Image: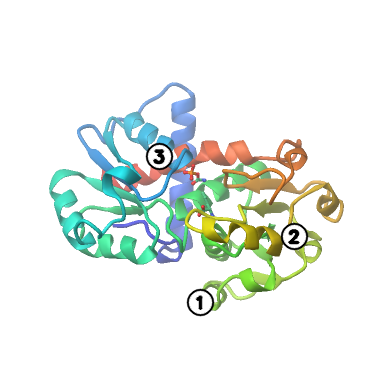
Amino acid sequence: MTHFLSILDFSTQELQELLDLSIRLKKLYKSGGRDLCLSGKVLAMLFEKVSLRTRVSFQVAMSDLGGTAIYLKPEDIGIIGKREPAKDMARVFSRYVDGIMARTFSHETLLELARWSTVPVINALSDWSHPCQVMADMMTILEHFGRLEGLTLAYVGDGNNVARSLAEACARFGLRYQIASPKEYMLDDQTLTEAEKARPGTVFTTNKPAEAVRNADIIYTDTWVSMGQEAEKEKRIADFQGFQVNAELLAKAPAHAKIMHCLPAYRGYEITDEVAESKNSIIFDQAENRLHFQRALLKKLLS
Ligand code: CP
Ligand code: NVA
């Protein structure tokens, strides 16, 4: 394992080993233990977009492992490649630090950083995918259900970066993925083809939320307006009417279905406050597991 850019770059076994390590380290840290395997190591964190969870959880994870993190905020680096090419930045960073974590607008920027970097590059969200998020999500599902294989995850909303990584993770871990989106916002063909190749029959697409949640063990949603799409906000809100995760939709799902959201959640839009705060909601467990998964990832990549 060199870079961590996409779920499908790894085998089920490699991903399972990362989850096992995440769970082991979570137990260790919860019981007051420490693993200072990254003592003296430095992670550069490059952000073209804002962040709460990703920034703080990576910084805490580095500190937990005895290392240091440098936060470069959007105003510091601007758009990668604007002041100097990504390939130059990657080579300069490689001379200073032991790992690079980047949140970029374009996925191509991440790939370019990885191409030129001699230290591991981690995808901290791009327009294309959000693999750290969905690995924390798989860990959360595993903790709540005791297994992944054979579960049904319904996603209601935009076929975006999070939805795409979920499709890949479901293919790798053997969940059925039922995604309901308005016609214009459906998961792209490339992702559907790759998921089908990874595990035939993983993804079922529909334009009807009720059809997706009918037999779901988990109901997942994300914002209708991702970072960088602010100019489309009004149109998107209009286009996504009928795709809210609310009590009416949950009435059509099994009573045991857990509610997930990567956060930040826009209550009153993709999810109601009532559902986000309901007893079946596990959204804060997901947020917590970002830390536990990334601690394991950093140990694996940087030590
Ligand atoms: N879920 C997530 O990545 O949150 P942030 O944008 O706050 O990092
Ligand atoms: N789809 C959202 C995820 C935020 C964590 C975005 O890209 O803004």
Residue at 43 percent across and 35 percent down: it is: 25
Q: Is residue 22 above or below residue 135?
A: above
Left or right for 38, reference 131 = left
Measured as percent of width and height from the top left, residue 211 is found at 80, 66
Question: Of the residues tagged 2 and 1, which is closer to the observer?
Answer: 2
Cα distance in 3D space between marks 2 and 1: 26 Å
Q: Is mark 3 within 8 Å of ligand 1?
A: yes
- Between 183 and 258, the one nearer to me in the picture: 183
Mark 3 lies on residue: 55
Q: Earlier in the sequence, mark 2 or mark 3?
A: 3
Determine which residue is flagged by label 2: 241
Q: Do callouts 2 and 3 mark residues in contact (Cβ within 8 Å)?
A: no
Residue at the (36%, 26%) spot, across then down: 34
Three-letter code for the amino acid on which mark 2 is drawn: Gln
- The disc label shown at residue 157, or none: none
What amino acid is found at the position of numbered circle 3 in the picture? Arg
Describe the element under mark 2 as helix, strand or loop.
loop
Q: Is residue 71 visible?
A: yes
Q: Which mark is residue 190?
A: 1
How far apart marks 1 and 3 lie (CA) works out to 29 Å
* Spot occupied by residue 48 in the image (x, y as percentages of width and height): 36, 51
* Quadrant of residue 75 within the rendered picture: top left
Q: Choose the circle earlier in sequence order: 1 or 3.
A: 3
> Could you say which is closer to the camera, residue 258 or residue 108?
108
Instruction: Mark 1 vs mark 3: give the one in front.
Output: 3
